[in-house]
Image: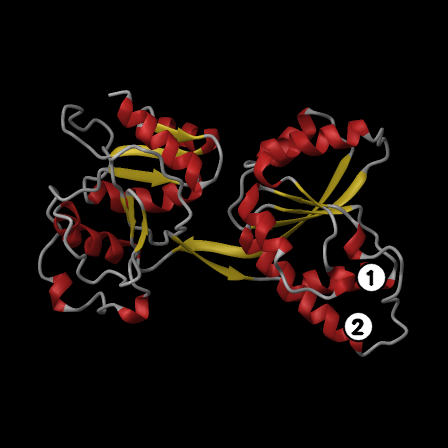
Amino acid sequence: MTHHLSTDDDSREYWIVSYPILSHRLENIQALADRILHAVENKVSYDGVVITSKRAVQAWVEACKQVASIMQERPDSGMDSERIWSTVPYYVVGPATAKALNSALLAPMLRPREVIGASDTGTGAALAQCMAERFAAQNVTQPQRLLYLVGSKHSLSLQETLEELKAPVELDELCVYSTEKDTNFEYHCRLLSNELPHADGMQSMHKMSPHVGRHNNLKLTELDHDEDMLSPTDSHFAVTPPSHGQAPKWIVFFSPSGGDYALSDLEAYNWVRKPKADKEKSMPKIACIGTTTASWVRERLGVEPDAIAGRPTPDALRDAIVNSERAE
């Protein structure tokens, strides 16, 4: 959860509680390291790298560590080549991915000099549009071979948009992390359900992190890490099912994949409406990041999102929520 939210002169306050839906595991790191090393030794066989998430950045960093270690043991391996991984462009989705890549501690021969995308490319489709425009402006006609790092669950929007735009690109796709549902997600829902009355009463949130950020009219908190919480089998949380009257005012979906994993638990807690459910009943409002996630909300939940953030930033999300509430 980020604490970097903007404020205005509005007097409303928000308690923001964040916990993970998904867990991730890096994979194929050796295969990635082999590709990086082969390219270094042969003075680069790729024209760029496409990285769409912070997890993919983590995989890149881990592979680069292996490569750097090997290169240090090979004084004649071409480390002084003028054209190695540091000189090819890196295309990224969103500012968080760009920040993670730019701040990564990498050997000079593997450190990106040109990162393209960031705030102007919050989706795969937007990044594809940016790439196509760049190639057109540079009069690129020969296919650009790009190393494309993805997770086990990823959107096809980037590939499909590049194909629609007939961009001169050949994507060499490599899955570098796998995604699955976080085993503690339902437990966190139960914990939040128990704590919501305290939050509504502006009281301290029992079992919440002591690190509460305050940004003028914004109150921010997050659940403790798993090792600091009671076990999910502890009787304090396992005695009774949740009270369905205790629901958050807003639920924010960040991606279709996360929504798919979370949906059954959210329905069980009556935090989102089940198909054919009573539409007169008051439910938490739905906010989402970007048009792709908004489309998922319409298709899976059968409702129009109450707020849609145009960019994947805290400021954009807060503005969308505030504007929705002001319009009531």
- Of 167 and 284, nearer the camera is 284
Query: In the picture shown, does residue 188 fall above or below 34?
Result: above
For the residue pair 25 and 77, the one nearer the viewer reads as: 77
- Give neighbour class at mark 1: few <14, some 14-19, many 20+ (Cα, 10 Å): many
Measured as percent of width and height from the top left, residue 138 is found at 83, 31
In the rendered structure, find residue 207 and report the number of the disc placed on it: none
SS at badge 1: helix
Asked if the residues shown at circle 2 and circle 1 are in contact, with their CB atoms under 8 angstroms apart, the answer is yes
Describe residue 16's horizontal placement relative to residue 106 as left or right.
left
The Cα–Cα distance between marks 2 and 1, rounded to whole angstroms, is 9 Å
On the image, the x and y values in percent for residue 327 come to 28, 20
Residue 250 image-quadrant placement = top left
Instruction: Residue 71: give its label.
Output: 2
Judged left or right of residue 177, residue 294 is left
Q: Residue at x 64, y 59 (%)?
A: 60
Q: Nearer the viewer, residue 253 or 10?
A: 10
User: How many marks overall?
Assistant: 2
Other residues around mark 2 within 10 Å, as few (<14) / some (14–19) / many (≥20): some
Residue 134 on image: x %, y %: 75, 32
Q: Is residue 212 visible?
A: yes
- Residue corresponding to mark 1: 40
Q: Earlier in the sequence, mark 2 or mark 1?
A: 1
Q: Is residue 49 above or below residue 157?
A: below
Q: Give the amino acid at mark 2.
A: Met
Residue 297 seen anywhere in this rendered image of the structure: no
4 over 127 or under it: above or below? below
Residue at horizontal 12 percent and vertical 65 percent from the top:
236
Snapshot quadrant of residue 162? top right
Q: Position of residue 204 (x, y in %)?
A: 17, 57
From the image, which quarter does the C terminus lie in? top left
For the residue marked with disc 1, what is the amino acid? Val
Q: Which residue is rendered at x = 69% and y = 29% of the image?
A: 163
